[in-house]
Image: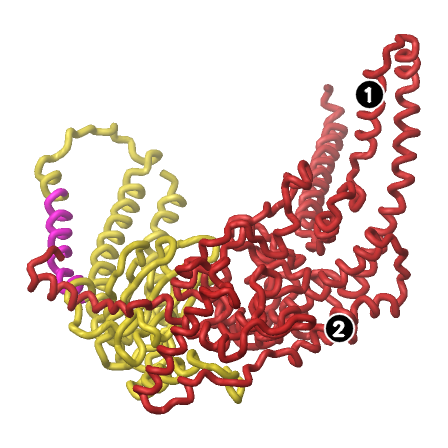
Chain colours: A yellow, B red
Amino acid sequence: MNKFWCLLFLAVPVLGVAAFAWAPGAGYWLPRDISDHGWQIDHLFYFVLTLTGAVFVATELALFWFAWKYDGRTNTQPVRFTHGSHDVEVLWTLAPAATLVFIAIYQMNAWADVKMRQPDVPVLAEVTARQFEWRIRYPGADGRFDTLDDVHVVNDLHVPVDRDILITLKSQDVLHSFFLPNLRIKQDAVPGMKIPVWFRARDVGEFDLVCAELCGWGHYKMKGRLTVQSASAFEQWLAETAAAQEATQEPEVEESE
Amino acid sequence: MCPSDAGERRRIALEGRRRRAATCCALLWLAAAAGCGGLSAPQFRLNMEDIIRETPDKDPDEFRITGREREQVRQGLLEEMRREKDPQKIEQLEANFGAALDAGTEEVLKLKRDKIKKLKILNTALVALFGTPDEPYVFPESGLDIKKIRLAAGPAQTVNSNVRRGLYRQHCVHCHGVSGDGAGPTAMFLNPYPRDYRQGKFKFKSTEFAAKPTDADLLHTLTEGIPGTAMPSFKLLPLDEREALVEYVKYLSMRGEVELAMARYLFVDEEDLELSRSTLVEFLSESAESWSAAAEHVVRPQTQPAHVAATDPAEKARLLAESIERGRKLFAGEKAACVKCHGPTGLGDSEDKLYDDWNKDKDPEKFGAEAATWVLPRQQLRPRNLRLGIYRGGRRPLDLFRRIYTGIYGGPMPGAGPSPGREATLSEEEIWSVVDYIRSLPYEGQVAVPPPRQLTQRSRQSGSLP
């Protein structure tokens, strides 16, 4: 094979590794983690990235080496065929299988934390995804849903900081996915299902809430805002929103945003 | 070829190469020209369909340039030949066919030329008053803010990394269309159809029945979306971008109204439009004045529901229960007659032959073949199901009060408050009671749903299936 092509193939692992070395510094990396459990997800991500990265680089280097060494134009030896090696077959079957089983067991705790160990707290809000917005409902002062004092908002999810948050996720039409990048939470919203989602946020601030499942032509505009705030600020916001919803007169001062 | 021709051969080869290079250049130029052609600026579409639907007794072709005139004349001549029995006459007709076709077409076109001229005048007047989608323009008399409109108009692009332009085409156009006709590419898949702004009618607003919405009303719709329809919330767009879009909606609406008024004047009243500034402004001001007067027509209830003022919780609950009961009676009674459409159970299932103003003229039986050309076929309107807790115009008691007080403009929902030439059917107090009743409907019996964890525990304890 032409040396040019060999070097071009070599560029794949070199550029691949270079891209990963460059990305974090340039801001193309995981978004800031503000959750309690997020480190587990990130740890698994780095673990799998290192593992697959090492295998990727090794495979690519081997490819390059074979292509370089056995260049058809310089190699005068006739091609030898082999019917394979039993030992090598066993090795490259068992090694990936063992790796996969290891990952499956290794991640169980992270999975259970995110999907199975639901905190024993009342549901804070019900989020209903629909084409193309997030309709959010809080139980209101009586703490119960489906009563007159439910508080309705759209695209504007507020939660208190440092508290176990339990949310019920629903969909009104098609598949959507409730994605909080900063909380390492991603859960599909499935029509006809009520799916519990929980997390705990450590930092206050405003973060993205986006749809991570192509749900139709307006998928790109299905963006909401997550506001993590102190418990008192959250209670105040909820009370103000509830009061505004009961208005029987136009508010004196037009709300400014 | 002998060797002495080598120089000649080189010359020919060089020329060949030059010719090929020239061909390549020409092809590239053609491709570039074609590419530019594909990106030609979008134009506002003339709204003739409203005029056609308003005058079902007239031939729809009277209002547009069809390009079918020659074919129609040809069909007429062929029909004449078919009817003719005398072979000599047929022969004569055949011989004269070409000349007769030319003469007939010319005659039809002569009649048509007047219409074509009027269409051109209409188009010129509208471009003079409002510009084009890429280069919008407004007269100061319109009261519109051209800066905001320029932000919303034109192709979607980001300038200086943070100023976004072409907002309408980025967020709205695929449903509401370039001309604001509510017939963008995605419109036909939606129920209800997106709003056609060109009639200047808006359903959900704080103002009296036929008054225009205020800027705050349009901003509210844009910010909160319209639950129960395909209109999503644009809450996360910065306020200045939303305000620019509100201004652009007003611009499209005003343009549509002026266009309709001019088209009626030209084609229905068959008058001649003089292309002078004063005439144009005359048409413009009628619409512009109604828009600028919107804020004067906001409905503000003079009274409050009794239970809102009460401070003692027990008293509050008693008054609310009383009000709901009074509202229930009114809802079912003759005076308010809500049940006529919304049904005795509030499911909105009593009346199924309802249409809003955008659909009521679209009677396929009346228009036949013309109806097949409509991008958006007639769509029925369902009275609201009041048990879903979905309120398109807002869920505040104040919003519901306004819906009942003024009715829904452009739809069959009548207003219970007073309007010019009509007495109020309900007093303010009675309207508040109906509001209380409607708000209680989705929660009748107040069924509480416990959180999932409790449900599992309880069902495990009682031994029933999870």
Assign the magenta stretch its main secondary structure: helix
Q: Which mark is residue B78?
A: 1
Chain letter of disc 1?
Answer: B
Q: Residue at x 29, y 71 (%)?
A: A145
Segment tinted magenta in the rendering:
A93-113
Residue shown at 31% from the left, 58% from the top: A189
Looking at this view, name the residue that lies furthest to the front. Answer: B334
Residue B413 in percent (x, y) is at 56, 63
Q: Position of residue B326 (x, y in %)?
A: 42, 74
Amino acid residing under circle 2: Ser
The quadrant of the rendering that contains the C terminus of chain B is: bottom left
Report whether mark 2 lies on the same chain as mark 1. Answer: yes
Residue A108 percent across, percent down from the top left:
13, 60
Task: Give the residue displayed 46% in from the left and 72% down from the top.
Answer: B434
Q: Please give the label number shown on residue B142.
A: 2
Q: In the depicted view, which residue is nearer to us: A37 or B443?
A: B443
Q: Tell me the amino acid under the disc marked 1.
A: Leu
Up the image or down, B120 lies above or below A183; here it is above
Q: Chain of mark 2?
A: B
| Foreground pick, A196 / A225 | A196
Quadrant the N terminus of chain B occupies: top right
* Secondary structure type for disc 1: helix
The residue drawn where x is 21% and y is 68% is: B451
Residue B292 vertical position relative to residue B194 in the rendered view, above or below: below
